[in-house]
Image: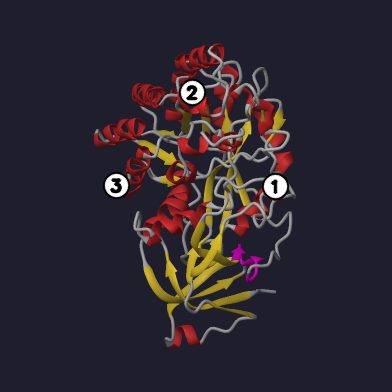
Amino acid sequence: MSSRTVIRGGLVITASDEMHADVLIEDGRIAALAASGTPAAEAWTAERTIDATGKYVIPGGVDAHTHMELPFGGTFASDTFETGTRAAAWGGTTTIVDFAVQSVGHTLREGLDTWHAKAEGNCAIDYAFHMIVSDVNQETLKEMDLLVGEGVTSFKQFMAYPGVFYSDDGQILRAMQRSAENGGLIMMHAENGIAIDVLVEQALARGETDPRYHGEVRKALLEAEATHRAIKLAQVAGAPLYVVHVSAMEAVAELAKARDEGLNVFGETCPQYLFLSTDNLAEPDFEGSKYVCSTPLRPKEHQAHLWKGLRTNDLQVVSTDHCPFCFVGQKELGRGDFSKIPNGLPGVENRMDLLHQAVVDGHISRRRWIEIACATPARMFGMYPKKGTIAPGADADVVIYDPDAEQIVSAETHHMNVDYSAYEGKRLTGRVETVLSRGELVITEREYTGRAGHGTYTPRSTCQYLN
């Protein structure tokens, strides 16, 4: 039994085109596009017709940086794969790439198997995995080859968090050399964690314990220094590099310089760095703890440099780094010691809407919105054109988006499993109306009609964005 859906009358927006077109979906895939009102489009018949008149028809978002159920600082991220993927769907995201974690002393395989067990049968939308490499040794390096072969083609390393995830320059170089051979992409958390730990210790000794000091000790210069070092190590290894959650103008400058030299160096930023700042970290009564994440929020003047980087393609992707911890009972672990506040913000539900607001505000174009939120993350991580576009043969991951609807972001109405919103009270223009994942309705006119277990694991090819 084949199933057919037609979406009629909308403005189809991809990274490369905008067109008034009808979309034919057959058996979970995009079968055809045709200009609205033409005989070709009018001839289509289907069991289900969706009227998108006055709406945008866009590819489902691809969020390439989430942390569901991540163990951190003695607690766990508060969203499960079930609650987190449901919230993602509400926000117009139809694919997440989460991070499986290798623990020190354990194999990559053990970490990957653990994350498969967490996600399998629980996701409302499709998912894939990156691999956090915490313990570089000869066995790990061999395993990297095997993982690339089975569709886990990106490996995250940390220049921060000594004693937890940290890799030294030698370990980083070895992993980069391996990825240069096997086609993998190294993702780097670029902060000088050794130096930051000294500054943390000194701040606490001075009695500087409030959340705002989290931003002050994790200095922009130490993000820039680590970014520069990662670029040079990648250059030595002959490997591509993807720097995650870029927050500082000085780090953007390092990426821009490397790209001007023709290097395969890429940068991701996140909505929190585009819309929030150290003003939030300084909120009184420990409220600032809600905004503790790493890299940290920066002073407002950094935002213009991030927007410019997105316009000039020195930054290519906006992901969320969604890693929620409740204010009550989790963020509060750091009362009296900012270094014990779990690092992370909720945002998987807000990304597509915030970036549409950026279109409304004139920061980016509509096509650039789709490029940085859908198409490029799919290309960067080997899922294009199955994901990230609306074209014949692509998965029917489609969002009907109302560009004129108004909403106020609030924890009272969001669907993430966390007791606050990082964007509480923010007014936005634009809202998701209907979401299809592989042709199945997950959100139907602002009602959840999906189910846990619909989402399937998606193996990935290697990076499709290289020079």
Of badges 1 and 2, the one in the foreground is: 1
Residue at left 50%, top 56%?
352
Q: Quadrant of the C terminus?
A: top left
Of badges 1 and 3, the one in the foreground is: 1
Q: Which residue is mark 2?
A: 175
Cα separation between marks 1 and 2: 35 Å
Q: Position of residue 289 (x, y in %)?
A: 59, 33
User: Callout 2: helix, strand or loop?
Assistant: helix
Taking 58 as reference, is 418 above or below it? above
Question: In front: 114, or 198?
Answer: 198
Judged left or right of residue 20, residue 213 is: right
Residue at left 65%, top 74%?
3
Q: Position of residue 243 (x, y in %)?
A: 43, 33
Of badges 2 and 3, the one in the foreground is: 3
Q: Position of residue 282 (x, y in %)?
A: 51, 33
Q: Residues within 10 Å of mark 3 (few under 14, many from 20)?
A: few
Q: Give the magenta part as a residue range.
A: 435-445
Question: In front: 160, or 94?
Answer: 160
Nearer-N-terminus badge (2/3): 2
Q: Which residue is mark 3?
A: 312
The answer to whether mark 1 and mark 3 are in CB contact below 8 A is: no
Q: Quadrant of residue 151?
A: top right
Question: In front: 412, or 55?
Answer: 412
